[in-house]
Image (cartoon, rainbow, N blue to C red):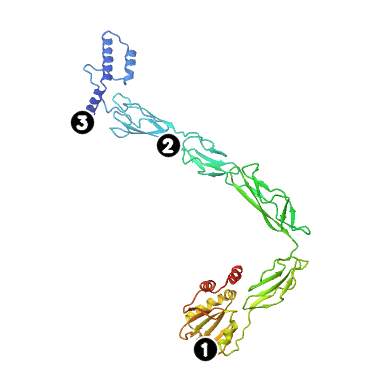
Amino acid sequence: MQDRNNRLCWRENEKFLELRGSEMSKLYFLLLFEALTHVLGLNNEDLGSTLLSGYNEVAPEEAPYRPQLDYSVPRWCNTLKLHNGEVACFSPRGGNYHNTLGTRCEMSCDRGYRLLGRPSLICMPSRRWSGTAYCRQVRCHVLPLIFYGTHTCTNGVMADSQCEYTCHRGYQLEGAHSRTCMPTGRWSGAEPICADRDPPKIKCPLSRVRFAEPGKLTTRVSWDPPVVKDTADATLTDVTLIGDPSGSEFEEGIHVMRYKVYDQARNKALCKFIVRVEVRRCPVLKEPLHGYLTCTPEGNLYGTECEYHCNRGYERRGNPTTECQFDHSWSGAPPTCATMEFSTDIRSSSSLLSQFYQKRRLLIVSTHSTDDEYYKLQDIMLQNAECGLNMREVTVVELLGLPPQQVGRISGKPLDSHVIEGLRSALRISKAYFSMVLLDKRGVDRERLIDPITTEELYSLIDTYLLDEVEREHIEKHRNYCN
């Protein structure tokens, strides 16, 4: 088996020697020169050894010369060493032979180093390796400084060096907070920036109240300029006032003064304060719920007399008039507008309806039984809608049950059975099932419902078809009252 391997290796080396013809010619010349020296008696061993040392000390043979390649020589080539790297060799003989003829060595560098040269070397018949290789330390380019910030690195620009970015006071880092020098010689990530995202701080003067001078409706108001600061900029000069400047004459009322300021990065900050100028007046009177006011003269100056009025379907309870006094107060307590009083001690439906004519709207609810599911659901919704119905001047009439247990009521007051029968007959209300009838202020049937209706749907129906313009304005003005 060993002879067979030798023959195979010999064939491969013959091919290799054919490619190296020029080099072998030089070898033949040196061998001839040594033979001639021996014949001439020039026994200079130093000269021969010096000439042959560059060719791995191959011993000359008698012509014709054929080099004998010995694969069993353990140290055919010098032992490879790679600083900052590793050498993995594979010999034809196997085992621990790492520099015999035909040995192939794979070169690899440690982390942070880059291989320059051939990644794979072969031990040649010339007793030399087929190339060279070495490991060079990986370096990244020097990171540039960023505006309004800096960076610190753990190991300069060497591989695995990590550089942390920080921004100057008042600036925020946008992007990666750190970058690492990769084994490829490039920095990880992208270069961050330091941006001024914090707006400046501005403190306005305090709000103030000033009274008009006697006999005048205006007064002069002055204040100090606002205080401005910024974390990035030392001085800020771009401060603008929106409104009349300090020292101006201000009319009666509330004046909102605004200042705005920009820093160099065009971040904006705002502040505001109020200048209120008061004239000797009484507080503005509020219109009573379900009513309105008439004042002579108009306004709320001292001496003004106002009279309270109630809408149709409501009655005034309390002092009818009030006067603005010198101490800024109105005389007496304001009256209220209460729902009109009506009588249930009557025997006919026409007498009942006449009390509401042109004053109130009626929502008549009829059910054959108080256990009816539709009625129970509608009753809950109507209880929650009581305030909104009063604002829309609607009174609820309930016709419950069948004779002889039928019951009628308005705001808890019972109705006579003749009135119940009269309402059902006049308005053609069935006794067999749940239903509702909506009447306007003239007693006209405007809507009939056989299913429960939500509060919002009921309000929408009334607001859309039954209210006049004055009532709509009143509801819009007091829309949040029931909340």
Q: CA distance from mark 2 to mark 3?
A: 47 Å
Of 216 and 288, nearer the camera is 216
Question: What residue type is disc 1 on?
Answer: Glu
**Residue 127 falls in image quadrant:** top left
**Residue 423 pos. (x, y %):** 52, 86
Mark sitting earlier along the chain (1/2): 2
Q: CA distance from mark 1 to mark 3?
A: 130 Å
Disc assigned to residue 4: 3
Determine which residue is flagged by label 2. 184
What residue appears at the point 72 percent right and 67 percent down from the top-left corner? 297
**Residue 168 pos. (x, y %):** 59, 41
Disc assigned to residue 365: none
**Residue 335 pos. (x, y %):** 69, 75
Of 80 and 410, nearer the camera is 410
Residue 227 shows up from this direction: yes
Q: CA distance from mark 1 to mark 2?
A: 100 Å
